[in-house]
C-alpha cells in the first residue's frame, strides 16, 4: 500500500493537525525515523480512544420507559437507558391511563387511585411535563371518561375513546379533541358504553387525519375525515403508526409476529420476526420498543428489547431484564431524567 492510500484511509478519523503530520510521514517514509512513526501511531490510538469515549457518553437521546402501578411504588415511572441502570422518575399522582408524549418529554394521564389532590380530575386528562415538573389540565377534557387515547405528533390534537357527558347523559364512541381550544367533535359512535366496545392502543398518523386502534380484538384503520373505520386484518390485534409516517408496526396472531405495513398500500407488509408483545415507536422512528419472552423470567415478566428498523438489529435492555409486568410503555428523552 502506498503512503498516499494509507493516508486517505485513516485521515477521516483524526484531527486536521494530526492528519497533516501523518500524511507527511506516510508520503515520505524514507525521511522519517522509526521513532517518528511510532509517535504517529500512538497519536492515532489516542484519537480513536477519545472519539469512542465521546460517542459512548450519550449513544442515543431517548430511553425506553414503562409505567406499572406496583404496590411498592405506584406513582413512579421507570426509565431503562440503553446502557446503565434503571431510573425511577416520581410522578405527581397515581395515574390510571397513560400515553407518552410524542417528543419524549411528557405524559398524558388520567387520575387513578389514591387521595384526590387539588387540581386532580376524576374525569378528564392531565399533562405531566418533566424537567421542570409541571401538571396541567388538558383543555376540554374534563367532560370525558377516557378508556383510550392518542396524542398527535404536534400535540395539537388528542383522540379519545370513551364517553362524553352532555346535559346529564353520556354519549360514547371516538372523539377528536383540538388543542389548545379544547373543542371536541365526535367521529364514531358505539352502541353502548362498555369498555369492550371502546378503541384501545390508539396511534395517530403524522397528519392527524388517520389512526390505528384495537377494536373488538382487531386492528382497525380509522379515517377522521370520512368518519369511518376499517379492519386492516382479523389477524392483527395491535399496532402503532411511525412518527415519520413511513410504517405501521403491527402484531399478528398468538405468536405476536411483527409486521411493518405500508400505510399507502396496506397489502405491502414485511414480516420482521416475533416478539412477546408491545410495539412502541421512538420519537425519531429509528427504533421500536418490544417485549421479549425469556425462560428465566417465568410466565408473568418480560424484558425490553429494541428493534432498529433500518438494520433489523435487536438489543436487550439489561436493566429491564425480567422487570416488566405489563402497563403502558414508551420513550423518554434522556434530558428529562438528568
Image (cartoon, grey):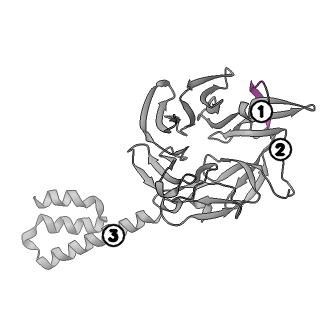
Residue 57 x %, y %: 46, 66
Instruction: Give the alpha-carbon distance from disc 2 to disc 1, as whole Å.
Output: 16 Å
Residue at (63%, 28%) from the top-left corner? 209
**Mark 1 = which residue?**
194
- The residue at the far left in this view is 30
Residue 181 x %, y %: 79, 38
Q: Nearer the viewer, residue 73 or 140?
A: 73
**Mark 2 = which residue?**
123
Query: Does the magenta run of residues contain 304?
Result: no
Query: Does the magenta run of residues contain 187?
Result: yes
Instruction: Give the alpha-carbon distance from disc 2 to disc 3, as whole Å.
Output: 55 Å
Magenta stretch? 182-191
Q: Residues within 10 Å of mark 1 (few under 14, many from 20)?
A: few
What is the secondary structure assignment of the residue under circle 1? loop
Question: Disc 2 vs disc 3: which is toward the camera?
Answer: 2
Whether residue 208 is visible here, answered yes or no, is no
What is the secondary structure assignment of the residue under circle 3? helix
Q: Residues within 10 Å of mark 2 (few under 14, many from 20)?
A: some
Prevailing secondary structure class for the magenta stretch in the rendered image: strand
The disc, 1 or 3, on the residue closer to the chain's N-terminal end is 3
Question: Disc 2 vs disc 1: which is toward the camera?
Answer: 1
Q: Nearer the viewer, residue 135 or 216?
A: 216
**Mark 3 = which residue?**
49
In this rendering, the answer to whether 195 lies above or below 19 is above
Left or right: residue 204 compared with residue 26: right
The disc, 2 or 1, on the residue closer to the chain's N-terminal end is 2
Quarter of the figure that contains the C terminus: bottom right
Amino acid at each position: 500500500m502506498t503512503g498516499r492510500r494509507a493516508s486517505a484511509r485513516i485521515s477521516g478519523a483524526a484531527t486536521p493537525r494530526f492528519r497533516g503530520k501523518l500524511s507527511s510521514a506516510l508520503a515520505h517514509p524514507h525521511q522519517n525515523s522509526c521513532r517518528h512513526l511510532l509517535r504517529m501511531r500512538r497519536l492515532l490510538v489516542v484519537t480513536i480512544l477519545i472519539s469512542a469515549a465521546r460517542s459512548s457518553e450519550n449513544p442515543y437521546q431517548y430511553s425506553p420507559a414503562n409505567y406499572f402501578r406496583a404496590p411498592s411504588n405506584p406513582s413512579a415511572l421507570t426509565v431503562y437507558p440503553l446502557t446503565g441502570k434503571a431510573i425511577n422518575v416520581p410522578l405527581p399522582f397515581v395515574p390510571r391511563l397513560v400515553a407518552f408524549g410524542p417528543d419524549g418529554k411528557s405524559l398524558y394521564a388520567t387520575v387513578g387511585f389514591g387521595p384526590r389532590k387539588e387540581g386532580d380530575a376524576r374525569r378528564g386528562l392531565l399533562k405531566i411535563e418533566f424537567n421542570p415538573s409541571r401538571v396541567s389540565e388538558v383543555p376540554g377534557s374534563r367532560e370525558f371518561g377516557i378508556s383510550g387515547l392518542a396524542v398527535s405528533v404536534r400535540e395539537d390534537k388528542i383522540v379519545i375513546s370513551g364517553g362524553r357527558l352532555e346535559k346529564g347523559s353520556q354519549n360514547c364512541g371516538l372523539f377528536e379533541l383540538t388543542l389548545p381550544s379544547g373543542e371536541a367533535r365526535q367521529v364514531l359512535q358505539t352502541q353502548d358504553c362498555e369498555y369492550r366496545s371502546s378503541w384501545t392502543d390508539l396511534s395517530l398518523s403524522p397528519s392527524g387525519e388517520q389512526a390505528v386502534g384495537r377494536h373488538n380484538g382487531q386492528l382497525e384503520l380509522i379515517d377522521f375525515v370520512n368518519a369511518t373505520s376499517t379492519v386492516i386484518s382479523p389477524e392483527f390485534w395491535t399496532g402503532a403508526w411511525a412518527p415519520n409516517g413511513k410504517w405501521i408496526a403491527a402484531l399478528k396472531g398468538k405468536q405476536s409476529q411483527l409486521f411493518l405495513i405500508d400505510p399507502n398500500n396496506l397489502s405491502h407488509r414485511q414480516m420482521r420476526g416475533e416478539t412477546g408483545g408491545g410495539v412502541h415507536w421512538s420519537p425519531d422512528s429509528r427504533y421500536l420498543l418490544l417485549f421479549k419472552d425469556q425462560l428465566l423470567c417465568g410466565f408473568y415478566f418480560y424484558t425490553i428489547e429494541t428493534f432498529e428498523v433500518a438494520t433489523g438489529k435487536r438489543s436487550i435492555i439489561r436493566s429491564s431484564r425480567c422487570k416488566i409486568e405489563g402497563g403502558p410503555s414508551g420513550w423518554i428523552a434522556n434530558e428529562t431524567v438528568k
